[in-house]
Image: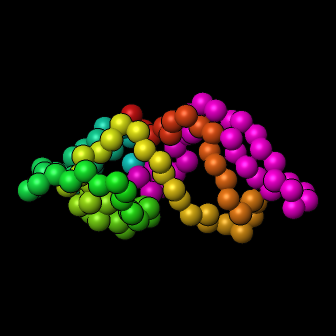
Amino acid sequence: YRVRQGTSDALQISDQGGSRAAAFQGVFYPADPETMRSEVRRLVGARRGEVARPLALLLPHAGWRFCGEIIAGALRGCVIPNEGIILGPKHTPLGAKWSVSSHDRWSIPG
């Protein structure tokens, strides 16, 4: 369920479901699926050393050109599960102070 602040201070809940569209493709990460795959292969590269199974990872989320190497370095050494929980900051003073996405998946190019 998505929780958002209404006209009063009360919170409203709505169920959106489905897939969350890629909001910033072509801006912070490639829009073209093949370019994205190629960039991920370049950034992540081959695993080096032991592979960890962390309970959590704290990763930056700016555009790939700003922090792609940092993200890839962390992911390179980890087993990435099929499912996970993503927590992210709010970048605007508008709307509710927090929300929970009801989307069952997030789409990326390709």
From this viewpoint, which residue is outermost toward the left?
Answer: 49
Q: Position of residue 29 (x, y in %)?
A: 41, 52
Name the chief secondary structure element in magenta: loop
Of residues 50 and 38, the one nearer the viewer is 50
Of residues 41 and 102, the one nearer the viewer is 102
Task: State left or right for residue 15 relative to residue 42.
Answer: right
Q: How is the image coloured?
A: rainbow
Of residues 1 and 30, the one nearer the viewer is 1
Res. 6 image quadrant: bottom right
Residue at figure coordinates x 31%, y 38% from the top left: 34
The span shown in magenta is 1-29
Q: Position of residue 17 (x, y in %)?
A: 64, 32
Q: Is residue 76 above or below residue 83?
A: below
Task: State left or right for residue 56 relative to residue 70.
Answer: right
From this viewpoint, which residue is outermost toward the right?
Answer: 8
Task: State left or right for residue 14 relative to residue 69.
Answer: right
- The quadrant of the picture occupied by the C terminus is top left
Of residues 107 and 53, the one nearer the viewer is 53
Q: Is residue 24 above or below residue 96?
A: above
Visible residue check, residue 35: no
Membership of 13 in magenta stretch: yes
